Image (cartoon, rainbow, N blue to C red):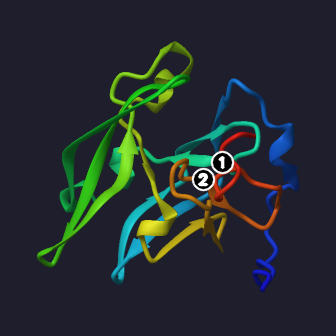
Amino acid sequence: MADPPMPATALPEESVWDYPRPPRLERFPFRLTVHHAGITLADSVGGFRVLETSHPPTYYIPQADIRMDLLRRNERRSLCEWKGQARYFDLVLEGRETEAIAWTYPKPVADFVPLADMLCFYASKVDRCTVDGVEVKAQAGDFYGGWLTPNLKGPFKGAAGTSGW
């Protein structure tokens, strides 16, 4: 069964196949929000996005615009060939913990220095994320963490069987 169409947005239409490899970092002037369990975890117009061929964008939000009092850094780490070593945060809310809800690059490589200590949330691990007021869908597979908006054209990497793209 096909997913229902997403609502319209003011964002321009983009094909993820026009995004570059290696990825490009750009400032993002539209509003980004993250909500979970009735709480706004993040609300920002000071974000960045990373664009990479075949992937929906990943959005990075400054810690000043995030409820950091609800997040706890964990021991998980991963390595991105383009951005450097990532660290992860768990959400601790009302005695419940959601593991690895967001990640950051504390010391990114030169081309991605503006991302230092900004956080990117997995849309699949929270109740709601928005870009320019439009609710996003999570990128399939949860490895890349991209946010799908109705202005994006795919197909998108991440789902089963797409790792060889």
Residue 54's place in the image compared with 9, above or below, is: above
Mark 2 residue element: loop
User: Image point 47% across, 17% down: which residue?
Assistant: 109
User: Which residue ends up furthest to the top in the rendered image?
Assistant: 110
Q: Residues within 10 Å of mark 2 (few under 14, many from 20)?
A: many
Picture quadrant of residue 154? bottom right
- Asked if the residue under mark 2 is in contact with the one under mark 1, i.e. CB atoms within 8 Å, the reply is yes
Above or below 89: residue 113: above
What's the residue at 25%, 57% (across, down)?
A: 90
Percent of width and height locating residue 124: 49, 67
Task: Identify the residue at horizontal 85%, vertical 55% (top origin).
Answer: 12
Q: Secondary structure at mark 1?
A: loop
Left or right side of 112 for 13: right
Identified by mark 1, the residue type is: Pro
Coordinates of residue 18 in the picture (x, y in percent): 86, 38
* Residue 76: mark: none
Could you tell whether 48 is left or right of 37 in the image?
right
Tell me the crowding category of disc 1: few under 14, some 14 to 19, or many 20 or more residues within 10 angstroms, Cα based: many
| Disc 1 to disc 2, C-alpha distance | 5 Å
**Mark 2 residue type:** Gly
Q: Which residue is mark 1?
A: 57
Q: Quadrant of the N terminus?
A: bottom right
> Residue 20 lies in what quarter of the image?
top right
Q: Is residue 2 above or below residue 131?
A: below
Q: Position of residue 22 (x, y in %)?
A: 69, 24
Per the image, the residue denoted by label 2 is 146
Q: Quadrant of the C terminus?
A: top right
